[in-house]
Image: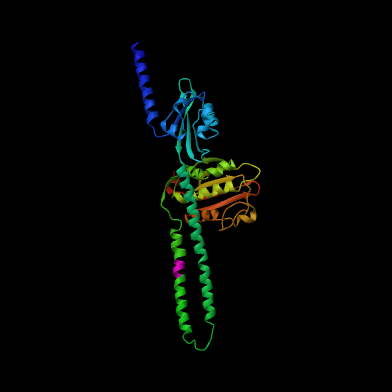
Amino acid sequence: MHKNNENIIALTGLNEELENYFQNTIIPQLFVDANLILRKFTPPAMRQFKLKKEYVGRSLTEIKENFRFPTIIDNINMVIATGEILEKEIQTTDLRWYQMNILPYLLRKENKTNGVIITFVDITSRIKDLKEQEKLIAEHELLLDTIAHDIKNPLTALAIGIGLLKKVQEKGMERFPSLLENVESSLTKMKMIINDLVQSRWHEHRYQAEEEILDLQNILEDVKLTLAPQINESNASITQHISVSEITFARRKLRSIIYNLVNNAIKYRAPDRLPEIHIETYSENGFMVISIADNGIGIDREKLRTIFEKFQRITTSVEGNGVGLYLVKQILETSGGKIIVDSMPGKGSTFKAFLKLDVSICSE
């Protein structure tokens, strides 16, 4: 009897601790049993999904509309059936984004899943920030490229005009040659300054950002979050096999490389099949190779030579400005790397980005 009392006291204490946790956590969480009966939920879940206390004990199928996410029942059933954790980014019908984690609740003695614990983290603002950041980066790089390219044209025209004026011979223009020489000298100095700015300082600072040790897995998750609407709309399947994950690189630059290549794989999908994208990494001769393969429309052989040029596009039937691959090539080459592509029209393409690895990483 004394032993039973101790067990009851211990169970009571554990239950109180669980109740305290559910009442005080700031994260929306649900506990659903193996029969899809809602057993507990946290106050934030009550506020976020307009849950009521009387919902406890009811089947989730009766209140699934509160979560505004159509496949939540299917996701729960999959975790119960497999006993594996499910982590995914979801968009609810009210256009909010969540990181949803469904964890199996295991009865270890019986070795079976008796329900799930579901956690929702609101990442709407993060998604918005990532999209805005990617847009600003693309616009900034495009603006700088356009300025550097276009500013040379009027200068060249001005130089030609001055050359023609020097040939003009008219009476009463004795001082004209010396005045013209001054203008020409000023123009030469201006060209030297601009050349220095465009060629030297630009190439030194253009893609410069603080380097840090990065985990490619984290970058991939950020990119998938940013492209989540396109992934969902196209029903794209993204698989990955990451053999090398750690690299010293600028976060913004690495995100831009992955973002542009994955975005293109989705954009240039074949109309008769769902897009399948496989991301793989491995080391080769001191480089991390990031391979992104797709089953899209592919690229004609004659276009393979020009796709990395600014404003060049694989096809005009897809929206874009033809800058993405150009930027990827510039980022890689200014960092000592390179990019190659292998493609077959109608079958798909494989882009391989080569990034220099640290000597210490290469030797491991």
> In this rendering, is residue 246 above or below 116?
below
**Residue at the location (47% across, 74% down)?**
187
- Most distant residue in the bottom direction: 171
* Residue 346 included in the magenta stretch of the image: no
Q: Position of residue 14 (x, y in %)?
A: 37, 23
Q: Position of residue 213 (x, y in %)?
A: 42, 46
With 293 as the anchor, is 39 left or right in this view? left
Secondary structure mainly formed by the magenta segment = helix
The C terminus sits in image quarter: top left
Colour mode of the rendering: rainbow
Residue 313 visible here: yes
> In this rendering, is residue 177 above or below 53?
below
Residue 28 visible here: no
- Most distant residue in the top direction: 1
Tell how many labels.
0
**Residue at the location (50% across, 71% down)?**
155
Say which of 349 and 316 sits in front.
316
* Residue 193 included in the magenta stretch of the image: yes
Q: Position of residue 141 (x, y in %)?
A: 49, 57
The magenta-colored residue range is 192-196
> In this rendering, is residue 57 above or below 128?
above
Say which of 355 and 198 sits in front.
198
With 274 as the anchor, is 38 left or right in this view? left
**Residue at the location (43% across, 34% down)?**
47
The N terminus sits in image quarter: top left
Q: Position of residue 271 (x, y in %)?
A: 65, 45
